[in-house]
Amino acid sequence: MNISHHFDDATLMAYAAGTLSQGMALVVACHLHWCPECMKRVKQAEAVGGALLDNINPVAVSDSALDNLLASLDDVPPAAVEKVEAVKPTQSDLPYPLSTYLDKPLDDLPWKWIGYGMYQVDLNFGGKGAARLFKLAPGVSVPHHTHTGNELTLILRGSYSDEIGRFRRGDVADLDSDVLHQPIVDTGEDCICLIATDAPLKFTGIMGRLIQPFVGL
Ligand code: ZN
Ligand code: ZN
């Protein structure tokens, strides 16, 4: 896989420290499944974290601290353990951590139409933030929006372009509240993405404000 867009170090460090929301950790774990480069950086972050623990006054660290840290670095989300039996061979085009959450191939999921050639499946993680699959038809442009928090996107199929560049299968977009963008599907194939946010999106145009209640992000 030819990956050209990766996560920021801050995101990989947060993943290694286990401080990301469940949805965001899933997006990172899925990219790591495909990206040896980011996996290497996570391993480096782990090593730094371990060295920091070694240098802390021993009485300040509980016996289980390192175990807890290592447990939080697990690439596979805990829910994967329960749902792993549902994985079918047809899921081989998906990164493993995501396939453990889905009991059907991408094309057979209950896609909900949200307008303007956009469909979504909510992964229903609950709590703060959200994770969902987005499907955008060819030629669709997502209304201009900024983010009130962070947004992590992994492209699973197809591609899109926005103000930042071109994103293809395996690429990730790691966006914070400074970014205003308008992704546009740029091939004749649907673009399917896994997206996690830690706060709602803020649409800026009239079109965006109209669909805001339906997107629910
Ligand atoms: Zn990467
Ligand atoms: Zn966005």
Image (spheres, rainbow, N blue to C red):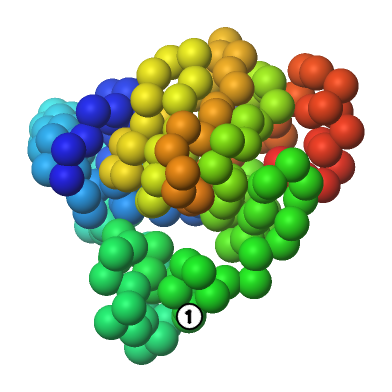
Rendered view: 209 above or below 72: above
- Which residue occupies the foreground of this view, 51 or 89? 89
Question: The residue tagged with tag 1: helix, strand or loop?
Answer: loop
Q: Is residue 85 left or right of residue 151?
A: left
Instruction: Give amino acid for label 1.
Output: Asp
- Please tell me which residue lies in front, 81 or 202: 202
* Residue name at image x 88 percent, y 33 percent: 210
Q: Quadrant of residue 173?
A: top left
Residue 166 occupies quadrant: top left
- At label 1, counting other C-alpha atoms closer than 10 Å, the crowd grade (few under 14, some 14-19, many 20 or more) is some
- Residue 148 in view of the camera: no
* Residue bearing mark 1: 103
Q: Position of residue 149 (x, y in %)?
A: 61, 26
On screen, residue 162 versus residue 114, left or right, reads left
Quadrant (top left, top right, bottom left, bottom right) of the N terminus? top left
Q: Residue at x 33, y 63 (%)?
A: 94
Instruction: Return the x and y of residue 92 as percentages of the image width and height.
Output: 27, 70
Return the x and y of residue 161 as percentages of the image width and height: 45, 25
Instruction: Please provide percent x and percent y for residue 111.
Output: 65, 64
Say above or below: 206 vs 100.
above
> Compared with residue 185, is residue 66 higher up or lower down, i.e. above or below?
below
Position above or below: 83 against 30: below
